Image (cartoon, rainbow, N blue to C red):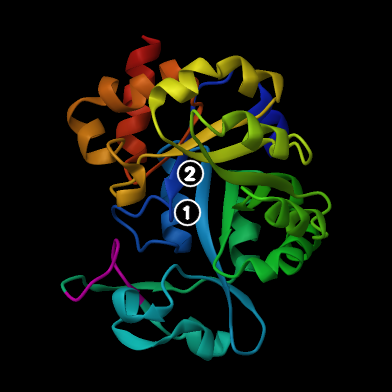
């Protein structure tokens, strides 16, 4: 398996599918089973949420509390890793109506053991202060070239913070917003750290289309979320399921080449159909 940066930089590759919290339709989100499903359905990247236990172990969980995924209304980070791993996860994206499964909360090490060389991993840190520690874990697990770390870069202070982190060997993805008024300023800032990719938001698809060459010259791939969330604006999975050309197709035509979705199978089928 090629390194993450080389894979993303390949101009001839298909658009990349990022499975949000794993492929969780049929497995608890952020679980080892959801990661295995992401691999099985042909996703290229799995997005996972990282936290730190009371006794200092890095583990995978999105919410602050375990209420949605395990029915326990207590902060996840107040448990030891042994306590966390004794808790059974609810199926899919949780909630009271979901059944309990045999899946447990995984550690970052367990995750890197099964993803390394099989699927790339976007590590979403719930506390960016863990940057160096997570990067060190990835290096220790020989997984550094298969993962990315990301945080917002929109100001000089945010840029300086990223520069001060030791994440040697781990790819860095910026999270930025592009608007017609500020895009050149934002890109000038990003050019100082040259992220291999940018998880972006934007004011209008026209801003992205009009600046395709700017992104190309920066060797920076564009990642967009089509999750059914307010931050995605009109670019959401539920519309893509009905009219994929209007969402995924339009974004691809504008130069987006990486998509984070809760519908990896549908996106995979669309890409195959588009390729003919």
At 32% across and 26% down in the image, what residue appears?
269
State the extent of the magenta-drawn residues as a range.
Answer: 89-96
- The circle drawn on residue 195 is none
Rendered-image quadrant of the C terminus? top left
Task: Label 2: state its secondary structure.
Answer: helix
SS majority, magenta: loop
Between 220 and 6, the residue placed more toward the observer is 220
Task: Report the side of 6 relative to 221 (left or right).
Answer: right
Where residue 5 appears, x then y in whole percent?
71, 35
Instruction: State the image quarter where residue 264 is shown.
Output: top left
Task: Report the side of 207 relative to 242 (left or right).
Answer: right
Between 82 and 47, the residue placed more toward the observer is 47
Where residue 13 appears, x then y in whole percent?
57, 20
Camera sees residue 3:
no
Few, some or many residues within 10 Å of mark 2 (<14, 14–19, 20+): many
Where residue 112 appears, x then y in whole percent?
64, 58
- The circle drawn on residue 39 is 2
């Amino acid at each position: 398996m090629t390194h993450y940066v080389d894979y993303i930089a390949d101009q001839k590759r298909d658009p990349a599918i990022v499975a949000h919290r794993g492929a969780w339709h049929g497995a608890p989100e952020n679980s080892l089973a959801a990661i295995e499903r992401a691999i099985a359905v042909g996703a290229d990247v799995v997005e996972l949420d990282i936290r730190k236990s009371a006794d200092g172990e890095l583990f995978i969980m999105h919410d602050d509390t375990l209420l949605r995924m395990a029915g326990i209304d207590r902060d996840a980070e107040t448990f030891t890793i042994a306590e966390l791993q004794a808790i059974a996860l609810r199926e899919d994206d949780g909630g009271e109506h979901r059944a309990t499964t045999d899946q447990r909360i995984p550690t970052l090490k367990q995750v890197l053991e099964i993803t390394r060389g099989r699927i790339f991993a976007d590590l979403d840190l719930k506390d960016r202060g863990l940057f160096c520690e997570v990067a060190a874990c990835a290096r220790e697990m020989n997984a550094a070239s298969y993962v990315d770390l990301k945080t917002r870069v929109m100001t000089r202070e945010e840029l300086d913070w990223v520069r001060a982190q030791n994440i040697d060997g781990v790819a860095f993805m910026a999270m930025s917003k592009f608007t017609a008024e500020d895009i050149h300023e934002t890109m000038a800032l990003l050019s100082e750290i040259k992220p291999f990719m940018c998880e972006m938001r934007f004011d209008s698809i026209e801003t992205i289309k009009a600046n395709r060459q700017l992104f190309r010259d920066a060797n920076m791939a564009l990642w967009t979320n089509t999750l059914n969330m307010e931050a995605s604006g009109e670019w959401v999975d539920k519309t893509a399921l009905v009219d994929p050309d209007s969402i995924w197709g339009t974004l691809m035509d504008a130069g987006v080449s990486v998509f984070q979705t809760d519908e990896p199978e549908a996106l995979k089928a669309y890409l195959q159909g588009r390729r003919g």
